[in-house]
Image (spheres, grey):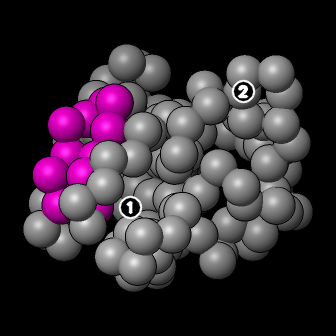
Amino acid sequence: MPNTDWSSLSDAQLLRYAEYHLRAEFTSYGFDASLPQAVEIGGRRFELGIQVLRSFKPVSFPKADLAVLAVFMDGKPAMLYLLPSDAPLFSKAKDRLELKLEKGNLHLLANYGFDFTVRRVAKRAASGRKA
């Protein structure tokens, strides 16, 4: 069981942990993850934007096919969310995707849990559709 005292880690350490965790998750599905930039799913390359969150605040991602949000709350395992760039939760800026999270709306991420979304993206990629 990993340490869940996330507040003892620096932002750089959390990002590194998120990238390792994400690579392991993608690999468990048989996908080639050349993190932090991209992952190949169903023969299609998806650009990734990765952010970590340890407190509720707006999060900004570079424009990418898929946004990965790693949420770290002390005492709980890291939670990974995978959001297609066209997810309705995003407000779109010129070259960024903006996500405003507050304690009361974290439930909005429920439809974007990593396991659920990666399967959906793989199915769409296999059929030639966008993420």
Residue 4 against residue 118 in the figure, above or below: above
Above or below residue 66? Residue 59 is above
Quadrant location of the N terminus in the rendered image: bottom left
Instruction: Choose top left, top right, bottom left or bottom right for residue 16.
Output: top left
Q: Is residue 126 left or right of residue 93?
A: left
Determine the secondary structure under disc 2: strand
Residue 97 relative to residue 71: left or right? right
Estimate the x, y position of residue 22 in percent, counting from the top left: 29, 50
Residue at left 78%, top 43%?
99
Q: Nearer the viewer, residue 115 or 93?
A: 93
User: Mark 2: which amino acid?
Assistant: Arg
Front residue (pair 114, 5): 114
Determine whether 37 is above or below 4 in the image: above
Which class describes the residues within 10 Å of circle 2: few (<14), some (14-19), or many (20+)?
A: some
Of circles 2 and 1, the one toward us is 2
94 up-or-down from 26: above or below: above
Residue visible at 82% across and 61% down?
A: 88
> Which residue was labeled with disc 2?
96
Percent of width and height locating residue 94: 82, 21
Residue at coordinates 84% horizontally, 27% vertically from top-left? 93
- In the image, the segment drawn in magenta is 31-41
Task: Indicate the quadrant where residue 10 lies.
Answer: top left
Q: Is residue 32 magenta?
A: yes
Q: Position of residue 21 (x, y in %)?
A: 25, 50
Residue 90 vs residue 6, the one in the foreground: 90
In this rendering, would 72 be left or right of 87?
left
Q: Is residue 42 magenta?
A: no
Most common SS among magenta residues = strand
Query: Mark 1 sits on what residue?
Result: 77
Say which amino acid is labelled 1.
Answer: Pro
- 44 lies left or right of 70: left
